[in-house]
Every structure is written in C-alpha cells, then in structure tokens.
Amino acid sequence: MPSYTVTVATGSQWFAGTDDYVYLSLEGTAGCSERHLLDKPFYNDFERGAVDSYDVTVEEDLGEIQLIKIEKRKYWYHDDWYLKYITVKTPLGDYLDFPCYRWITDEKEIVLRDGRAKLSRDDKTQILKQHRRKELEDRQKMYRWKEWHPGFPLSIDAHCHSELPRDIQFDNEKGVDFILNYSKAMENLYINRFMHMFQSSWSDFADFEKIFVRISNTISEYVMQHWKEDFMFGYQFLNGCNPVLIRKCTEIPKKLPVTTAMVECSLERNLTLEEEVKQGNIFIVDYELLDGVDANKTDPCTIQYLAAPICLLYKNLENKILPIAIQLGQKPGPGNPIFLPSDATYDWLLAKIWVRSSDFHIHQTVTHLLRTHLVSEVFSIAMFRQLPAVHPLFKLLVPHMRFTIAINTKAREQLICECGLFDKANATGGGGHVQMVQKAMKDLTYSSLCFPEEIKAKGMDSQKDIPYYYYRDDGIKVWEAIKSFAEDVIGIYYESDEVVCEDVELQAFVKDIYVYGMRGVKASGFPKMIKTREKLAEYLTVVIFTTSAQHAAVNFGQYDWCSWIPNAPPTMRCPPPTEKGTVTIEQIVESLPDRGRSCWHLGAVWALSQFQDNELFLGMYPDEHFVEKPVKEAMAKFRKNLDEIVSAITERNKNKKLPYYYLSPDRIPNSVAV
C-alpha cells in the first residue's frame, strides 16, 4: 500500500504550539485519502518550534497531490496553532512543499496548495480554480474597508487589535502597547519624574539637559551641541528625519517678498538673489499645509500655537545649505516680518525654532503617518483581498506587509484617536492632525511615491549640484535594487505584457488601491490597471520601497533628531513673533514645551525609533513562500546587491561626525511595523 511521509513544522512564536486534535487529509488527481489523526492531547507533538513527521498510508496511489486539508478540533479550550509548512514525500521519493505561515484558530480547517506560484490562468482543474476563488471570498469577508475619517485613505474595518484576523495580529500585543511603551521609555530614560509636570516651564536651554540622555558620539548629542548653528539647521532638510520637503527654488514666491538687499550679506557669489535663483543656488521649504490648521485645545490650561512658515535656503561656496530668510506666516505684511541671519541673535533663533516645530508636525502627520503608514495599510488590505496565497505577487509582497495593519490599528486605538497619546504633547493633537491628512491627500500622488521621480520633480537630483544629499543617494540605490528584484520575479511568471493584462487578480489588486486607497481620485495618478511588465515592475517597487525603505528613512531617525527638544518642539506655547527686536531668551523658553509635554515627546520619539524584537530587514525572507529555484536565485542576487549598498554606505560613513545610515539595507525593516 502506498505510503506518504508528512512533515509538519510548527512556528517558534510564543504559544505557537497546540494540544488540540489535528487531522490531515491528502487530495490528489487520482483520489483522496481518509482523514488521519496526527496529534491529540498529551502526545506532545506540534510543540512550539517542533518539526514532526508521520506516515500516511493509503489504499491506492493518489496521483499528484494538489491539496492538503488540516483540521483542528478543540480538546479543552481554544488553543491557536501556528503552522509554518508541511512537506510531503511521495511513494516515488519526490518532495512537495506546502507553505502555510498562518494561525489555525478555534475549530477550523485550512486547505493548502503546494508552494509553486501560479497565476489564475495556470489553474486547469476545477478543484484548484474553486480553491483559489473560495480563498479570496473568505478573505474579502475578513479584510473589509472602512473610512476612519472623511477624506482619508480607507483602512481596515476593526475597532481594536483583537478584532483583526489572527494572521495579521502581533504575536505579543503587549510589545506594541503605545501607552505601556511610552511609559516604559520614560522610565528607561529616567525622566518619568517630569511626566506629569504640565504647565511647568524649563528655566533655560541647559535645563532641557535634565531629560536629555547623553550617549557619546551619537547624532543626538551632536544635535544638542550644534542645534543653534545655521549649518545644522540646513543640514536637516537634506539628511534629518524629514528630508523630503526641500526643493530647488525656481522663482521667489510673491508671498515671500525677499529682496537682494535683505539677504546680500548671506550671498557669497556677488550675484543678486534672482541670479542666484537662476544658477540653482536657492532652495525653499514651504509649510503652507499648516495654514488654517487648528491648534490643540484639549488642555484648557495651556494655549498652544501653530505657524505656517516659509524658509529660503542658500547653497554657499562650500556646498552647505544655509537658511537666509524665514517668514512665519503665509501672508506678507507688517505683522509678519521676514527674519534674517543678520537680525538679533534671539530673533533669528526663535524663527528657526518655529520652522523646526512646523517641520516636526509635517513629518509626523504627513511624511510619516500618511505617506508610509496609511499608504502601506492600503497596499496590505488590497493584497489580502485580491491576491490568493498561491499568486506570485502575494508571495513577493506578503513579507513587506508584516504587522502593518496591526500597528495602524493600535495607533488608531491608542495614539491618534480622540484623547489619544498624540494629544498629550503635540500642537496638532485634538484634531489638527486629521485636518492635515485631509489637506495632504491632494499631494499624495503615484509619481510622488516613485522615489527617483519625486527627487527630480523637486529639482534635487543632481549629485554635482547638491553633493551631500545622502537620503537621495542611498534611496536611489535601494530603489534600483528593489526594482531589479521585482523585474527578475516578473520575468519568471509573466512571459509577456499580454499575461500582465490578463491577470485578473493583479488588476483587481491595482483597482482596489485606486478606488479605496486613493478614493478614486484621478488626479492621484494611481493607475486603474497595469498593462506592461515594465509598469508592473515600477508599481511593485513603489509598494516595496514605501513599506520598507521610505518608512525606515523617516521613522528610525526620530530619536537622533528630535530628542533635543529645542530642535524639534512638538508644541509652542506662545504665538509667533510679529515684530523684530523684542525676543528674549525667557520668551523662547516660555514658548517651548513644558516639562510634562517634553517628557511625553521624548518617550514617543524613543519608542518609535526602536526596532522590533526579531526584526526582519530588507531581503530577509525566512518564511519560504516561494519554493522555485529561479526565485531563490533572484533573492540571492537581491541580497548580494543590498550587501554591496551596505558596504558602500559603511565606507562613506567612516569618521563622519554625522553619519547617514537610515537607508542602509541592514537597518531597513521589511515592513511598517512600528
């Protein structure tokens, strides 16, 4: 009688094993096996991290095994089980891999296909077509779209983490409890004694050092020592944690009436301001989006303020980017002066602090929340709804969606909800952050997520003209490596553009993103369908780059650049100055966050800058969703390319006082998970 050897691998997460009854049946082209009991209570099989083998004897050869059915039946209480994969050795000695990497919960069953990736056109038998269709039908019931706020990209229909499908929940929910983590961070930083001291001002800049953790030879310490300098102010627009706003100025806007006479002491080439603009030496950062946004009113004891500044910058003869003019409001006039480096020291310093505070708000809500977290969630939901596990693009993308829906759900539950943690320390809390996302949606375009295209559109693409823009240099290298990998995978499964056009599941995935993520807005430029392999490669690169590299670039530098409070104030407690010559050091300190808000801010940027336990970095794919040799070779090539980028970045950073490493692939997690 034919005998099949079945090997079952259980996950290594906490509580991954099970003591329930587990049954298995095989379905082949020539018949089905009976249901075989693999495990029952107290057998000690399917323990956490275990690999167990069983012989399944059948009366007749089953032919080519197409499906494996696993059933779990409760013994005493619901005991979830994480099944990694099943390997079947046939009577002829062939091995078949059946990837799972899912939780089996309650008294449920799952049906697995073998690990070879297949497009829908490749399925010839009715049983495989039906399995594919049913998987998507079930997923679409579990992964439902929901509008969290009008005008936002749609998100998952779940009020809290525990309502999510088990497969996308965190292994340990406590590990991502924002309240717990922020409190723990403040405790670890020895600043928890200040956390309830709202309305209590610091006495001077040095007083902020009471909550500043000195770690020698780090970026945060360098920032603390040099934050007042114009060089440090300008450098952050290129390589800080929000290096996405600066653009080459092609014309001085009418709303910023700067003249050559105002800034001539900052210009080094004996040219007029207009001539410097023509030569490409003037840059601009405009915080217009903040204009009209309501400041946080959740604490009646502290009035908080926002500004919408415009900052003009200049590339000097040393190729350093330096600020030369700052206007703190959008409408020019007597009560909205243009601050200059030649002004009184404290006038100029306070103007720069206002820009840094505004930059912090745009970074947190637009650059970070909207353009990485919320967009990545859209990609994740669409993938689960429209791509079955056997689809090559599901296998390609699923490592880059790990925990993204979960972290966003926790954020909506604790962080950015009404009366959430965001309200405690941020001037855009209490609803301002919602207004900002709604306003920023008009600029969320497909081309803006195409990294090289966006850099070029801002006029920041020339390494010769702007030599120290490491965010650009490293980002383009990582983009190209991801694109090359996507092209290799596409070449394996899509032999022509026609195959791309005919892939109904791919087209449904793309349409879901356009209709629900981008709300069907034509101006977003998101495609409704993909017609060529070249466009598909670009699209997949956008998805993978956004969920991995872009998030890493704007997330993991938060403690480095924002832990020194005067360099990134999360709120301002006095209005912007309306005249020159009146600012004092006391006024600046009174404007900066109080002790309580400073502590909550510090706890937040510390917690947000930490990698997850057992973090998986770009190119690390321990879950073997793909089993084919050509794809594994493509993965090896991808890792080799990434290793070369790591080496180049490491070499460049040697002996630098301000190393740039946020886009080094060994520091880029695969997905948005923090």
Image: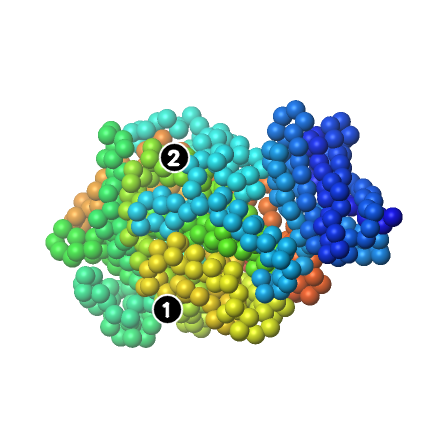
- Which percent across, then down, holds residue 170? 55, 39
Residue 545 in view, yes or no = no
Going from the N terminus, do you reach mark 2 or mark 1 first? 2
Q: Residue at x 71, y 36 (%)?
A: 22
Which image quarter: residue 14?
top right
> Is 641 drawn above or below residue 373 in the view shown?
below
Q: Is residue 252 left or right of residue 655?
A: left
Residue 180 in view, yes or no = yes
Q: Residue at x 29, y 37 (%)?
A: 430
Q: Is residue 125 left or right of residue 65?
A: left
Q: Nearer the viewer, residue 159 or 448?
A: 159
Q: Amino acid at mark 1?
A: Ala
Q: Residue at x 58, y 62 (%)?
A: 120
Rounded to the nearest angstrom, the CA distance separating label 2 from label 1 is 36 Å
Q: Nearer the viewer, residue 381 or 327?
A: 381
Q: Determine which residue is flagged by label 2.
A: 421
User: How many dots with numbers?
Assistant: 2
Q: Determine which residue is flagged by label 1.
A: 457
- Which percent across, then down, holds residue 582? 18, 45
